[in-house]
Amino acid sequence: MDSFQQFGGSRHEYRLKGWQRGFYLVLGLAMGAFAIFMLTNASAQQAQDFVLLPALFFLAIGIYLAALALRSKLVIEGNRIEVQYAFRERSADLREIEGFRTVTTRNGSFLQLQLNEGKGRITISRSFQSDDDQRAWFQQLTDLDERGRKALLDEIEKQGSLGATPEQRLAAVKRARLWNLCVTSVAVAAAVGFNLAEGNLRIFSAAILALVPVVVQFLVHREPLLYAIFKPRRDPRADLGIAFMASGVGLLLGARNVEFISMKPLLPYILLGSLVCAMVVYGANRSSAQVWGVMIAALFFAIMYGYGLAVAVDTLADQSKAASFVATITGKHTTSGSRTTTYYLNLEPWGPIQKPNVLTVSRDFYQAAAPGDGVCLDLHAGALRVPWYKLVNCHGQPAAQPPQ
């Protein structure tokens, strides 16, 4: 790396690809124009109360996108590389770069140059134009993902506890993948059972989902050369991440029909479950160069797990006798996301809730319900002493009843 044969001392600039630069610019100008329209068409009082902050937000995003389109570039000059985005830039000499990693997200992938001695990273978008000279420059860099993969395989081959010969030790990787498939299949089946089954089978499914992070932690701690959670793509180990995600999503979906008088008493249990789940992921990735990126992704599933587990314990272990109430419907409304619609009934005060409140229901129930009808609710004390209630059939109660 002491000399650079392909470029010599010449300078090469690479802008964002044309379509992407145009997209950012048009979108940025549109958002800026919308912000100006909001400000110029609002009265002084409206601007002060409602318009100013949203307009400034749209204006800031518009300026950022326009700057991203106009200023972003990748510059290679001799042994030096410089990356410039909207309002920041980073540069490094070839001798300062340890190598590169390929980081994959749900929105695509990008390169990440790792500097020597932990002095930081430089992110390079795949959206920059490229040519043979640029590719030749990057070929001089060490592929840290491939280096890590080979180092891990070498370590597995030398680990005597995995087998008597290098071939037997490498075969242990295949067995780990088979065990991973089994754990993942059980977790997915338990998630389905927790959401569709009733009685003891539902309780059994919830117990399995609660134990999945424990099993994952056991496998990773016992055989760190064979198992990982949210591993890089080229890592040869078995990835237990899907089993981990299934436990969180399954518990969360199973809690969707439960309502609470107040969520505040449940928060400590949610935080405790989420923290334990997050620590499992951190323990498995603390030596990874991408540990914080993994933790951000895992945090969502950890919160799902913490919430779902707290609800499952409070409701499934609850042995208290339910108190029955009938609440009158005063109205109804929906909220829509990108893929789903949630249906709500507006209820008058009932039982311990001394103010108007809402109840989440299914689409069919929502369509059949009308203001003036009554809905029957069973209120429970909760195993964790967090009162909860759910919609039930009225079982012959007089007055208004929920539609059947």
Image: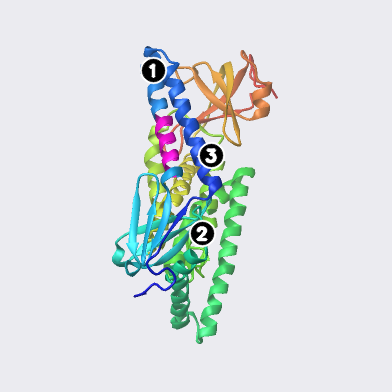
Looking at the picture, tell me which residue is in the foreground, 212 or 165. Answer: 165
Q: Is residue 69 above or below residue 167?
A: above
Question: Mark 3 or mark 2, which has the lower sequence index?
Answer: 2
Residue lying farthest to the front in this orientation: 10
Point out residue 97 in the picture as x, y percentages from the top left corner.
35, 66
Kindly report the distance in space between the C-alpha atoms of the residues bearing marks 1 and 3: 42 Å
* Residue shown at 34% from the left, 55% from the top: 90
Residue that numbered label 3 is attached to: 255
Front label number (2 vs 1): 2
Q: Is residue 165 above or below residue 140?
A: below
Point out residue 284 in the picture as x, y percentages from the top left corner.
41, 62
Q: Secondary structure under badge 2?
A: loop
Front label number (1 vs 3): 1
Kindly report the distance in space between the C-alpha atoms of the residues bearing marks 3 and 2: 49 Å
Mark on residue 90?
none
**Kind of residue sitting beneath label 2:** Ser
Residues tagged 3 and 2 counted as in contact (Cβ below 8 A): no
Label the magenta part by its dominant secondary structure.
helix
Q: Is residue 150 magenta?
A: no
Looking at the picture, tell me which residue is in the foreground, 157 or 96. Answer: 96
**Kind of residue sitting beneath label 3:** Ala
Residue lying farthest to the right in this orientation: 404
Binning the other alpha carbons within 10 Å of mark 2 as few (below 14), some (14 to 19) or many (20 upward) gives: some
Residue that numbered label 1 is attached to: 47
The boundaries of the magenta stretch are: 57-68
Kindly report the distance in space between the C-alpha atoms of the residues bearing marks 2 and 1: 46 Å
Q: Is residue 362 visible?
A: yes
Looking at the picture, tell me which residue is in the foreground, 94 or 147. Answer: 94
Question: Mark 2 or mark 1, which has the lower sequence index?
Answer: 1
Residue that numbered label 2 is attached to: 130
| Picture quadrant where residue 384 is located | top left
Point out residue 379 in the picture as x, y percentages from the top left corner.
51, 28
